Image (cartoon, rainbow, N blue to C red):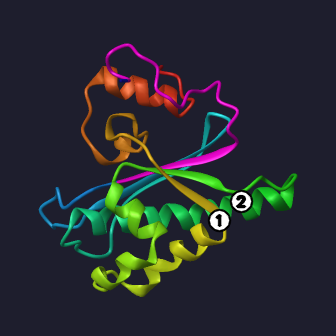
Amino acid sequence: MIGSGGNPKWTRNSQDGLQGFCDANWASQEHHHSTSGYIFTIDGGAMSWSSKKQGIVALLMTKAKYVSLMHAAKEALWIWAFLSEIAKPLHHPTKLFCDNQSAIAISKNDQYHACTKHIDIQHHFICDHTDCGAIMVKYCPMAENATNIFTKVLPAPKLEGLMLTMGLCSA
């Protein structure tokens, strides 16, 4: 665990290339909109991040996390295309870490779609990109998800550990 002195699985010394983390804080505000966040690192250094209110009110935590996953997938595809234009092409798939097993299952398996018709069709585009191998969605325990910085109030030791995960140093 990060806050207890241990090193997270994802550190600044990583040579994993492009990888991302995404999260959402399901309806924790008065307006009941969830806040989505994502961060992308290249070889352990933060290079793109976002935190913003979702445009929809998610009735389920899975939907809020899935919408966050969809926004992160769009950013991953854009970063991949951009870096391929200005440098050498990156190797697919881009790893995208999420802390919700249900959202991951929906992104990988069409059989869940009959039960999730309430999730807009536009959000299901991630399935196409996981099917073709452009994105690999993987589980990341909530305690080690770097996007907690954007979606949760954290104690100082936890914040510092997540900053190291993103390749940032404390002042």
On whether residue 36 falls in the magenta region, the answer is: no
Query: Between residues 72 and 129, which one lies in front from this camera angle?
Result: 129
Quadrant of the rendered image containing residue 13: top right
Q: CA distance from mark 1 to mark 2?
A: 5 Å
Query: What residue appears at the point 20 percent right and 68 percent down from the top-left corner?
Result: 60
Is there any visible trace of residue 117 in the rendered image?
A: yes
169 in relation to 45, above or below: above
Left-right relation of 126 to 51: right
Name the secondary structure under disc 1: helix
Percent x, y of residue 48: 58, 50
Circle 2 sits on which residue? 80
Query: What residue appears at the point 36 percent right and 46 percent down from the top-left corner?
Result: 150
Circle 2 Cα neighbour tier, 10 Å, few/some/many (<14 / 14–19 / ≥20): some
Which mark, by number, is residue 125?
Answer: none
Circle 1 sits on which residue? 77
Give the magenta range.
2-23
